[in-house]
Image (cartoon, rainbow, N blue to C red):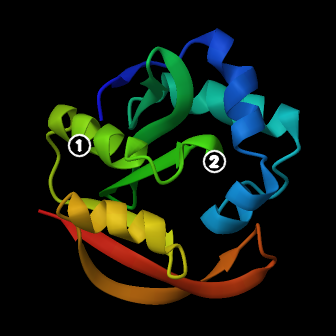
Amino acid sequence: MAGVALRSIEDSDLDALFDQMRDPESVRMAAFTAKDPDDRKAFDTHMSKVRISHDVTMRAVTRDGHLVGSIACFVVDGDTEITYWIDRSAWGQGVAGQALALFLDTVAVRPLYARAASDNLGSLRVLQKAGFTITGTEISYAPARNAEIEETILRLD
């Protein structure tokens, strides 16, 4: 898809990212979200931490110059995991796949891991098209659904 690009997160992106990450349908689909997606103070605190962390690489996802999401990788228990959030208005248009391909070109760490709610078929398709393979599942607490649900774990070598 032409027009998809990555750039550094800017202070001026934070309002839009906060709004994207609290959209009810997006939150339900992502499942593993902030405890309270409407808590702006918690969002700002989290973003301040991740933007300066040496263990996090985070980029804004733009389409035709407009912010449509974010993508990041971070270290958990020695493993590097990838995550992304695409505004619901851009779902099903190839934005996530293109952003992931661009991001993977800039992240040399392998293996990379990803996780998605097992019923988030769109995200699982995006990850598998990028070369991630399913390595298993586990039951995890999903704050957005206030329940334990199945989460699929993927790996890219």
* Residue at the image position 85 percent from the left and 53 percent from the top: 36
Question: Closest to the observer: 121 or 109?
Answer: 121
Q: Which residue, given by chain and number where applicable, does mark 1 sit on? A: 101
Task: Assign a secondary structure to mark 2.
Answer: helix
**Residue flagged by tag 2: what amino acid is it?**
Arg
Place of residue 25 in the rendered image (x, y in percent of width and height, measured from the top left): 75, 60
One can see residue 73 in this view = no
Question: Closest to the observer: 46 or 64?
Answer: 64
**Residue flagged by tag 1: what amino acid is it?**
Ala
Place of residue 155 in the rendered image (x, y in percent of width and height, measured from the top left): 24, 68
Locate the N terminus by quadrant.
Answer: top left
Label 1: few (<14), some (14–19) or many (≥20) C-alpha neighbours in 10 Å: some
59 horizontally vs 119: left or right? left
* Residue at the image position 43 percent from the left and 27 percent from the top: 59
Place of residue 131 in the rendered image (x, y in percent of width and height, measured from the top left): 17, 63
Q: Can you say whether 136 is above or below 3 in the image?
A: below
143 horizontally vs 134: left or right? right
Label 2: few (<14), some (14–19) or many (≥20) C-alpha neighbours in 10 Å: some
Task: Assign a secondary structure to mark 1.
Answer: helix
Q: Which residue, given by chain and number where applicable, does mark 2 sit on? A: 88
